[in-house]
Image (cartoon, helix red, strand yellow):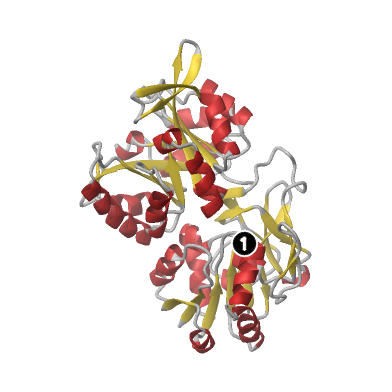
Amino acid sequence: MIAIIDYGVGNLFSLVSSLKAVGAEATITGDIDTIKKADKLILPGVGAFGDAAQKLKGTGLFDVVINEAKNGKPLLGICLGMQLLFEKSYEYGCHEGLGLIKGTVVPMEGKLPESLKIPHIGWNALHFKKESPVFKYINDGDCVYFVHSFYAEGCGDALIATTEYGKDITAAVQKDNVYGCQFHPEKSGNVGLSILKAFCER
Amino acid sequence: MITKRIIPCLDVKDGRVVKGVNFENLNDVSSPVELGKYYSDCGADELVFYDITASSDGRRLFTDILRQVAENIFIPLTVGGGINTLDDFDRVLKCGADKVSVNSGAIKNPDLIKAAAQKYGNQCVVISADIKRVGGEFHVFAKGGREDTGMEGISWIKRCVENGAGEVVVNSIDTDGVKKGFDIEMLKRVCDTVNVPVIASGGAGSADDFVTLFKEIPDIDAGLAASIFHFGEVKISDLKKTMRDNGITVRL
């Protein structure tokens, strides 16, 4: 069973229906025991980093997620959920993340050519730097759906894929059993469903 | 680079698709669920569902159907029609909409956009504006294009974006239904004014009209149409190939 971690941010409707579509059993939960018993974890999220990190701490889930991941349980962070996997974020201040993957989350503003619109919204192509089991069913150049104004940098060896938006932007990361997608697999058509399917098979 | 988006729009009344839809291989051509899946499978980059229901009973039906549509498609879904309050945003977002499009609701209450953007984020709020030339000026029209508000269109859109709208749909009443191409002049003015994604609507009659749109206005993000897709005059998969052959970046 997959636990979609509910800490009060974001709309989880599409994530549940897309997991159902790939035949996975998933539950939305904020309950620590259920999360500990689950086979796999998904950390979703939209909104602001500081607010989300605060909510994870307030519900006691911050340390639970770190411990479960360190014990080897597969964990997938999506969008803001991916950004939370890193050490820190400079989204309106400086906030501490889960620290499961090396890297820092920074604003796009000021780092991209001025002609580009922020947020980065729409379908963009993935360019793989490395193989990763979660992306085994998809190909270099496949498009996925992004919505974000901040991105991760300094990910080192964990960098799996980038997308081009004025410069190379971190699109996917992996460190051992911890995976992250900056884009929304649940909104990325068949390509996105294939990514979720591969994660469910871990 | 980010791809240019092609967006079919479905008008739904009391839970059924209206305006003749003419498809082979579909059992129920007025089922929003079947049509949503069809478009999602044939390469649409996003879907827009527009609720033209008049009664509150019909609106409840729309909400039920919306949930079923959202469960069956895995591309972004924008919902518009009858959005006047934050409760309306809440209602459609809980059914699986990703973005909510506001038109007359923002004209009646300009603070709606600000409040919605603060609560749900700019990326969630779409301003849809019906614009028509009146005496050499662009005017905003309300009530489905029937009522001239007297407001200047480009500055209205600018104000909505400043208030937090994260995307703009520009419907040109002048070119709508004429099928002779998008309103390049009007759309250029909007793209020069705002720095959020702009979606062109009104006037598409052929694949070439989309090519012209994206070639003439490199800043435009998406093209939206209804009847030419519904009647199969333009197939989305063919359209995207034509666009690619003309050097436009698309998702195939």
Left or right: residue B115 versus residue A116 is left
Inspect this view and state whether residue A172 appears.
no
What residue does disc 1 label? A182
Q: Quadrant of residue B181?
A: top left
Image spot of residue B229 (x, y percent): 35, 38
Residue B232 vs A68, above or below: the answer is above
Residue B58 vs A199, above or below: the answer is above
Q: How many marks?
A: 1
**Few, some or many residues within 10 Å of mark 1 (<14, 14–19, 20+):** many
Image spot of residue B110 (x, y percent): 49, 36
Q: Amino acid at mark 1?
A: Gln
Inspect this view and state whether residue B212 appears.
yes
Q: Residue furthest top?
A: B135
Q: Quadrant of residue B54?
A: top left
Left or right: residue B123 versus residue B149 is right
Q: Secondary structure beneath disc 1?
A: loop
Frontmost residue, A112 versus B236: A112
Q: Which quarter of the rendering shows the C terminus of chain A?
A: bottom right
Frontmost residue, A116 versus B217: A116
Image spot of residue B45 (x, y percent): 47, 48
Residue A178 vs A126, above or below: the answer is below
- Residue, x 26% and y 53% (percent of image)? B60
- Residue, x 60% and y 74% (percent of image)? A56
Q: Quadrant of residue B172?
A: top left
What chain does badge 1 belong to? A
Q: Which quarter of the rendering shows the N terminus of chain A?
A: bottom left
- Residue, x 35% and y 37% (percent of image)? B226
Image spot of residue A193 (x, y percent): 47, 65
Left or right: residue A48 versus residue B244 is right
